[in-house]
Amino acid sequence: MEAMGVSFLSTVPSLVSVVPSPNSNSLGANRYFTRAGAILCSKKETDHVYGDYGFHRRDVLKCIGATVGMELLASSGSWVEMASAADLIQRRQRSEFLSNIKETLSKALTENLYLIPSVLTLALNDAITYDKATKSGGPNGSIRFSSELRRPENKGLSDAMSLLDEAKKEIDSYSKGGPISYADLIQFAAQGAVKSTFLDAAIRKCGGNEQKGRTLYAAYGSNGQWGLFDRQFGRSDSEDSDPEGRVPLWYKASVQEMKDKFKAIGFGPRQLAVMSAFLGPDQNATEALLVTDPDVSPWVQKYQRSRETVSQTDYEVDLITTLTKLSCLGQQINYEAYTYPVQKIDLSKLKL
């Protein structure tokens, strides 16, 4: 019997050879017997058994089903392997591209350290336009449009946006999988800015010694906490400005107004306190205001104490967690973004 390229006779003997021989005195033993390489079958009316050696029809059908099933599973393995290989290739492509992006942004920020507070606020203001009721806004790069960038709440952020425009030109020049979205660019610039402040704090704790500070940050820093943030790579850009009136004037807003805005996007006093560096150029002044609120004050004090420790663990981990959530509000991440077809090698052109 042949079915779908499966040889039944080639597989069944190994399945039934483990049963007792007819020489056994047990009652069940008389039902089975195998002969090397073949199965003898003849009709036997008693007890619906087939063959002189007691094969039931259901036994044969079970063997057929098992054999065909195993062959189908085996034949699907090549498709699984191909899918896995393609997934690994795409992951490598995205990882290499992201690594290059971070290097480009790090260089740009290092050469323009004075713009780090503006880059942080730029990322916050782009993302905090998210509206839960309409599922609109969020970190979609809409702040790049002049109509949105000129709004009062974004005053002073144009230089930061110009810096990222220049970085984007460089990134797009070496991208093999299409231009980077502004949505991704802005949030990864914020990540780079945050890392820069973490590193700067470590260097200060080492008396200004950059080498020791880098060693301290590598040993006790929070680099390992960025995994989820890095996976949220593939945001889509908006084609228009977000609606007005969704972003407070941080330098004029009361703590209650700030709390209300953070609550509207699903955050609380804890997240407001940990993002104090995003709310204006002077973090100390911002925290002096936040500490006047009884709900926010305990968190502000907790993070201030954490920043005095060697590792800053509580502060850094909570800030990374909050920024990760903020940076993908309302976004449907395209996990195949920036991938590209692999060029096939024409073996016929090889001279061996």
Image (cartoon, rainbow, N blue to C red):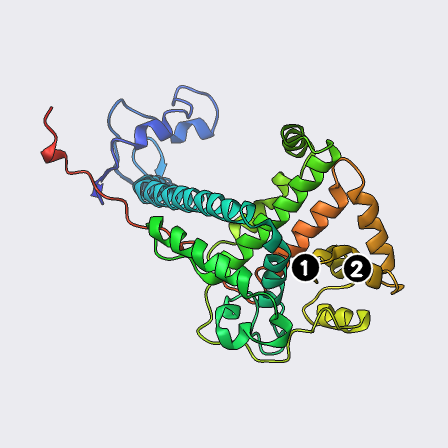
Cα distance in 3D space between marks 2 and 1: 12 Å
| Residue under numbered circle 1 | 278
Q: Residue at x 80, y 38 (%)?
A: 309
Residue 239 in the image, given as x and y percentages of width and height: 44, 73
Quarter of the figure with residue 165? bottom left
Return the residue nearer the eye: 307 or 176: 307
Q: Compared to 8, does 110 lie above or below?
A: below
Do the residues bearing badges 2 and 1 touch, measured as CB atoms within 8 Å? no
Residue 45 visible to an observer of this rendering: no
Residue 140 in the image, given as x and y percentages of width and height: 51, 67
Q: Kindly give the residue lying farthest to the top in the view shown.
A: 23
Mark 1: which amino acid? Answer: Phe
Position of the C terminus, as image quadrant, is top left
| Residue under numbered circle 2 | 285
Residue 311 in the image, given as x and y percentages of width and height: 74, 37
Return the residue nearer the eye: 187 or 213: 213
Q: Compared to 331, does 97 lie above or below?
A: above
